[in-house]
């Protein structure tokens, strides 16, 4: 991640509401049972991924469908850290 992108993201996290939403997902993991964390997704899912994602690599994005019982679509954006919808194209669909 570039220093400019890190500074941009840090600025966004200064907003309490933005930070709360981003952090509550991680907080909830500790409140969930291990069994619940292994549960399969049961609703249709659209997974947006960019090749510039600093946290999730291409294999993680490609394997999203393994965690789902419902249809899962993966769309990716090449060269975009933000996943601009103009650059998104359909990569794969799993049922």
Image (cartoon, rainbow, N blue to C red):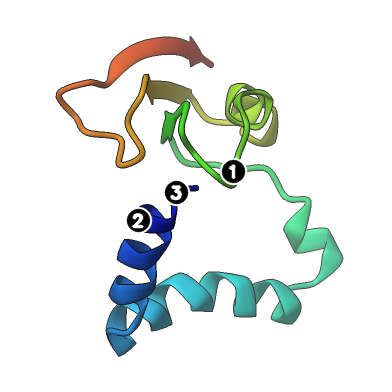
Q: Which mark is residue 41?
A: 1
The reply to whether discs 2 and 3 touch (Cβ–Cβ < 8 Å) is: yes
Q: CA distance from mark 2 to mark 1?
A: 35 Å
Characterize the local packing of mark 2: few (<14), some (14-19) or many (20 or more) Cα atoms within 10 angstroms.
few
Q: Earlier in the sequence, mark 1 or mark 3?
A: 3
The reply to whether discs 2 and 1 touch (Cβ–Cβ < 8 Å) is: no
* Apparent side of residue 55 relative to residue 74 in the rendered image (left or right): right
* Apparent side of residue 38 relative to residue 64 in the rendered image (left or right): right
Give x and y (percent) for residue 15: 27, 84
Q: Which mark is residue 2?
A: 3
Characterize the local packing of mark 1: few (<14), some (14-19) or many (20 or more) Cα atoms within 10 angstroms.
some
Q: Which quadrant would residue 19 be assigned to in this image?
A: bottom left
Q: Earlier in the sequence, mark 2 or mark 1?
A: 2
Give x and y (percent) for residue 25: 54, 70
Q: Is residue 53 above or below residue 61?
A: below
Residue displayed at 22% across by 21% down: 87
Give x and y (percent) for residue 41: 59, 43
Residue displayed at 62% across by 80% down: 27
Taking depth in this image into account, of 33 and 25 the one nearest to the observer is 25
Residue underneath mark 2: 4
What is the secondary structure assignment of the residue under circle 2? Answer: helix
Residue displayed at 46% across by 13% down: 93
Q: CA distance from mark 2 to mark 3?
A: 5 Å
What is the secondary structure assignment of the residue under circle 1? Answer: loop
């Amino acid at each position: 991640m570039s220093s400019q992108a890190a500074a941009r993201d840090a600025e966004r996290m200064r907003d309490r509401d933005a930070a709360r939403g981003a952090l509550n997902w991680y907080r909830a993991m500790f409140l969930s049972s291990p069994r619940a964390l292994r549960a399969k997704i049961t609703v249709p899912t659209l997974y947006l991924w960019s090749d510039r994602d600093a946290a999730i690599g291409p294999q993680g994005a490609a394997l999203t469908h393994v965690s789902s019982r419902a249809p899962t679509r993966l769309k990716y954006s090449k060269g975009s850290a933000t996943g601009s919808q103009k650059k998104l194209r359909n990569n794969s669909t799993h049922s």
